[in-house]
Amino acid sequence: MTARPVRSLSRQQDSNIGPWIATLFCFVLPSLAAGQTAELAGTWNGYWARAGDTLPVTMLVKRDTGARYTATFDSDRLRVSGIPFAEVKTEECCDVTLVLRGDRSSLTFTGKLRGDSLTGSFREEPVEGRFAFSRAPATTPAFIERDITFRSGDVTLAGTLLLPKLGGRVPSVVFLHGSGAEGRWASRFLASRLAARGIAALIFDKRGVGGSSGDWRVAGTDELAADAVAAVARLTLEPRIDRRRIGIHGHSQGGTLAPMVAVRSRHVAFVIGSAAAGLPTDSVEVFSILNSVLPEATTSDDSASAVEYTRELVAVAYRARPRARLDSLVQRLTGRPWFFPPPAADNQYWRFSRDFAAYDPVSWWRHVRVPVLLVYGAEDQRVPAAESAERIRVALRAGGNRQLTVRIFPGADHTFRLRPGTSGWPVTAPAYVASVLDWIVQRR
């Protein structure tokens, strides 16, 4: 869709990353200035500040043998880890420029390096802010990282295994993807927290993303679930992984497909369904789209027209209804403040919607026999939280499974964040991260 970015189960990039940072993952390769002399490499602790809000950040800068700098940053509040800067430049003695670049916006940091201090300003049009960092002692992670590849049919998938340094055989979690072009970075924060607590984690790039071959845009539910099953199977080959304690974590689309993965893999010992849909997929799509467009409707007639149009669009996409009535509605409603045109005829939305329409998550949940954790934000605008949780509970019980824990976090959205303040930086719902980690740790 070009006129309005309507988010939905099948189209949004629904990783556990806030909207402002989600724009920053269309990276270019780091470009660096020649003649660098300032010693920027090291670990830096500090903050970014704007609009009266302060965001704690840790930055890691490395320099290779060719005197080229690269940098990444971590932020617990943003729930991100190892996010790379697109550019790192130094000029003369002490001028430093770092750039985070995405498809919709960029943050440019310009500052002065003075010994163990790095301070300056940043700009994300049209907002400006300040930053300050102090050099910190290098820390040794409690886990090791190793890049791995594995096959799923004719596709090669690339990922990273985060493995605790200590202990013998350890439990593990495979992270499933949300919709869109999601790479391993999307789950790195929770994966690193698990590894620090003695639980291995496998994060991998979706088909056609990062180091993985294939194309997620032409993959259906069967192929996406097969990729997750292959990831679980790959973990069973690791000598330090306890094959009896491998779990899966899926958010949104990944959570909705999680029961299929759990049923198809005999190695899945527990399931975390994060914002997992428990209704028919076309109903979830209508719910998602209407929550995006109805706020733009200015009259009762506008609202009624938006509902009519959305239901017709979804019926065409999911149930192959003829397009004549939809095309008529397009002609009549174009120009309304809430209106968005249907995707182009060659857009992957139509194929994926038809495929997803055949997927019934509840029918798969009836066959899940392992412990399940369901987590939702009470204000989720993409997936009906309470209704989904109840339908999944009924399905599990129908199959004889009473090993269910449900947590719904008040005031939280689809990514478990509260409404941001004037800075735009999100705040995670209290206890969300601890609740997920603690439940997984109990599976040890």
Image: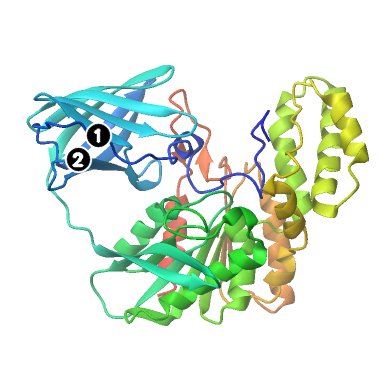
Is 96 situated left or right of 284 in this image? Answer: left
- Front residue (pair 407, 74): 74
Secondary structure, mark 2, is: strand
Q: Secondary structure at mark 1?
A: strand
Residue 88's label in the rendered image is: 1
Q: Which residue is at 65% across, 68% downward?
A: 222
Horizontal arrangement in the rendering, residue 419 relative to residue 83 (left or right): right
Left or right, residue 131 beside residue 205: left
Q: Which numbered disc, 2 or 1, marks the residue that appears first in the sequence?
A: 2
Q: Residues within 10 Å of mark 1 (few under 14, many from 20)?
A: many
User: In the rendered view of the protein, which quadrant contains the N terminus?
Assistant: top right
Q: CA distance from mark 2 to mark 1?
A: 6 Å
Could one spot residue 275 in this view of the protein?
no
Residue 213 location, x and y as percent?
A: 49, 60
Q: Are marks 2 and 1 in contact (CB under 8 Å)?
A: yes
Question: How is the rendered protein coloured?
Answer: rainbow
Residue at 56%, 42% (x, y): give it.
412
**Taking 278 as reference, is 105 above or below it?**
above
Q: Is residue 144 visible?
A: yes
The residue labelled by disc 2 is 69
